[in-house]
Amino acid sequence: MLLSLLAIGLASSQPSIQPERPNVVFILADDIGYGDLSCYGATKVKTPNLDSIAKNGVRFTDAHSAATVCTPTRYSLMTGEYSFRKPGGAGILSGVAPSAIAKDQPTMPKMFQAAGYRTGVVGKWHLGLGEGRTDYNKLITLGPKEVGFDESFVIPATGDRVPCVFVENGRVAGYDPADPIELNYQKKIGDEPAGLERPELLKIKPVQGHLGTVINGVSRIGFMTGGKKARWVDEDIADTLTSKAVGFIKSNKSKPFFLYLATHDVHAPLLPNPRFNGKSQCGLRGDTISELDWTVGEVLKALKDAKVDKNTIVIFSSDNGAVDQDGYEDPRENLNGHKVNGALRGTKYELYEGGHRVPLLVSWPAQTARGKTSAAMVTQTDFFASFGKILGVNLPSGANLDSRDTSEAFFKLGRNGRESVVHHLGGFNSPLAYREGDFVLVPKGKGWELFNLAKDLGQKTDLAASMPEKVEAMKEKLYSIAPPKA
Ligand code: NG6
Ligand code: CA
């Protein structure tokens, strides 16, 4: 173990004397907003299993994803580094993008491995695969394994992007060498219908940006040929991921484990399994949230069955805020008053709170308070350093530049989380917002807006004109963390 610690540049700050180190299950949902769960006020959809994490632990009201879209958030979660520091940045990646994380980069899962944990990722990866353009006909040699996961079963990019296949431990699951996979994001390849060419085949109508190959009745972003036997059925994705996650827990219950379960729910296309149809009173989105809640219930049950629930930290959060409609039309257009981001202003793709203030539930029955709410300001980027603290591992210098130990806030109901944090839109040289205490500075055109979130959570009153000195001071602090690029 010492050898492996040294190998990735970590040093144990004290001999590991904790006899029972906690397992960690980190569930990161996709595009779940601040108003999407019943424990955050939703009434048109019920999320009893998610709510049970809150009942057994702590519900955070001021928790943030690093960015307003998927890839940069996941990059920060894995590396502890703001993704705008990465040369070229990390924007929403295609299904042929190389790995955003370098082979030798320290990561949170590598830290768990070095501390003797078995690590696994199930679900949406979206951090790029391979060293150049991804070739799905070969073993992928830079991906989850190299980032620190012993076991992996992943959706390469998103559910609405090609390739529509799972990659298991570096290879396409169910790959058929007689039917090689080819992808193109620029032009049509193959003779399968694409976009609106055969509208009668479509289960769900694209409204923008999704005019690629039609797979399982859904026109995707990008074109794909081959891999026919390996293609997923959207309505079964949650079942597949759930059974992989449960299988991981079962087979690793005797050692400490770190499971990162990154659900496809509730990203577009919203195609829950038909058994969830009509489960909610807010259309397809609500039904898909019900499916997500079912997944969470199965995972909690697996922990109980394996008798590891008491000493497992369960974390639930979302990779970015919600948006009502994302590339496809909701055929039932039936949100029925459900507010995806609750009382927050803004959505995914925006730097207002709705883009990045997300649900966060943390339970650790052996340690934490039950049924509490925490108003500490926390960010997912800090889980790396905070787990380092819990595991008694020093973080390597130069690594996870931006991850801070806020373990007291995450796991001990400590009131002090972050004093300040940078919110990233996502992508290279994209706008940044800066939060400090109650105030948040949000870029607008060439200028700024300033909000006092303690008094104005809905960001209705821009204070920039009345508090120019505050704007200047916060701008300088933001620039000291993230110098503006020429
Ligand atoms: C956008 C897509 C959107 C979604 C998003 C990624 C269009 C018009 N929009 O480019 O549908 O796929 O990328 O979402 O194509 S994320 O949650 O993975 O960041
Ligand atoms: Ca997302």
Image (cartoon, helix red, strand yellow):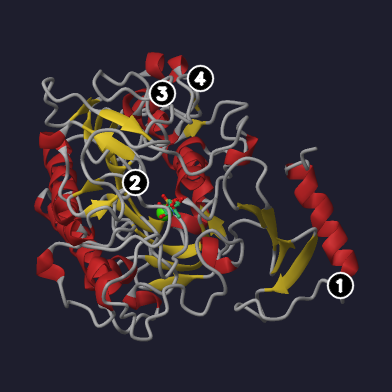
Residue 32: % across, % down: 38, 63
State how far apart marks 1 and 4 are (Cα). 45 Å
Closer mark to the observer between disc 3 and disc 1: 3
Residue 142 vs 270, above or below: the answer is: above
Identify the secondary structure beneath mark 3. loop
Disc 3 beta carbon < 8 A from ligand 1? no
- The disc placed on residue 133 is 3
Of 233 and 114, the residue lying toward us: 233
Of 293 and 369, the residue lying toward us: 293
Residue neighbourhood size for the residue with mark 3, other residues' Cα within 10 Å, grouped as few (<14), some (14–19), many (≥20): few
Disc 1 beta carbon < 8 A from ligand 1? no
Q: Residue furthest right?
A: 469
Q: Residue at x 9, y 68 (%)?
A: 275
Task: State the residue position of label 4.
Answer: 9
Q: Residue at x 27, y 52 (%)?
A: 197
Whichever of labels 1 and 4 marks the residue nearer the N terminus, that label is: 4
Whichever of labels 2 and 4 marks the residue nearer the N terminus, that label is: 4
Task: State the residue position of label 2.
Answer: 158
Q: In the picture, which quadrant includes the C terminus?
A: top right
State how far apart marks 3 and 2 are (Cα). 17 Å
